[in-house]
Amino acid sequence: MFDIPPVAEPSSERVTSGNGTSGPTQWVSDLLYRAYYALMVAVEFVIAPIQRWLGTRRMPYFFLLPNLIVFGVFVIFPMLLNFVYSGTAGTNLLPQDRTWVGLDNYQTLLSCDNFRLPNTCAEDMFWRAVWNTLVFVVFQVGGMVLLALLTAVILNRQIVARGFFRSVFFYPVLLSPVVVGLIWKWILQRFGVLNGFISGLGGEPVLFLLERDWATFWVILISIWAQMGFYTLILLAGLQAIPAVLYEASEIDGAGGWQRFRHITLPLLMPTMFVVLVLALIRAVQVFDQVFVLTGGGPGTATKYLVQYIYETGFAAQIPRRGLASAASVLLGGVLMLFTLVQLWLGRKTEVT
């Protein structure tokens, strides 16, 4: 039985000051203790009958129930509703008022003569967003994981002001993606800080956000800058979990820095690396708010990614196509789940070997 430990009655003794009155600190402490005692009595009065009814083994499920209810209402139910919407068409909002079309929305999205040429697809904007997202994921995840690993290895060494540098690298993570987008838009726009600096050196202003290659480059770089600190901390925790005795033994055997990194650090850090890859991949595919504030998906469709396509198709268009947007989100969720399962399987396989 899940027993609440007995709480002793509050003591009536008080520590008095020199003039015979109770000290203010003791009075506050006694008041808080009485409040705590009353709260514990109330909790025991509510929990004890439930515990007797459910039994000790079922009590954890009782404590998990509020979280499960919230998860079901705000996660599971919307997912199921999204599946329903993906099989419907029309402009009505309520599912019962919409026309059931089955798999037509999926057929529209996947109808292509050549998937590498979006112009040959029935829904060309969807495939432009797919290829843009693929390019973003490859360069953003790859670059961020490499930089995060390099930073974690450096910060794991005994360097001057190590705590300061850890805080500096983690600081961008604390900023809202919208704030990050606004800050960098102010820096990169036509009359922004960076172009002001270039003009001061006698150069010509560069349209960083209005040229396709520049816009893609800066979107990827800013995303790496904003998120790298989080993954650096995860990798740093993994590095600190590696026993120092292994490095000491390798030094005695004459192993160099690269050999220690290759044969000790990387193999033992691999489980953490897989966790970082999974989290970074999911985060990269979901990119939206930061890029939307920075470029709006432009120039043209250069930085329009899948989540922005889903948002504009289902909500921002003059004639919303919620069924098509729901079908696109289902496909996106399915691909994410597939990649996650593959990476987890590879991670377990690596741990076994």
Image (spheres, rainbow, N blue to C red):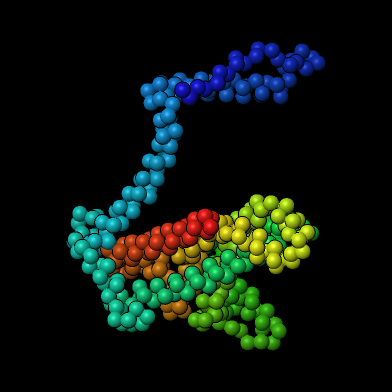
- At x 66%, y 53%, the residue is 242
The residue that appears at 41% across and 34% down in the rendered structure is 61
Image position, residue 302 (x, y; %): 45, 78
Confirm whether residue 234 shows in the render: yes
Q: Nearer the viewer, residue 185 or 150?
A: 150
Q: Considering only vertical position in the picture, is 27 above or below 74?
A: above
Q: Residue furthest right?
A: 18
Q: Decide: is 167 above or below 182.
A: above
Q: Nearer the viewer, residue 146 or 220?
A: 146
Residue drawn at point x = 67 percent, y = 64 percent: 261
Residue 215 point in image, percent of width and height: 52, 77
Give the side of residue 112 with respect to residue 255, left or right. left
Q: Position of residue 328 (x, y in %)?
A: 33, 66
Q: Is residue 226 visible?
A: no
- Residue 271 at what x, y percent from top left? 55, 56
Q: Nearer the viewer, residue 267 or 134?
A: 267
Q: Residue at x 75, y 56 (%)?
A: 248
Residue 106, image quadrant:
bottom left
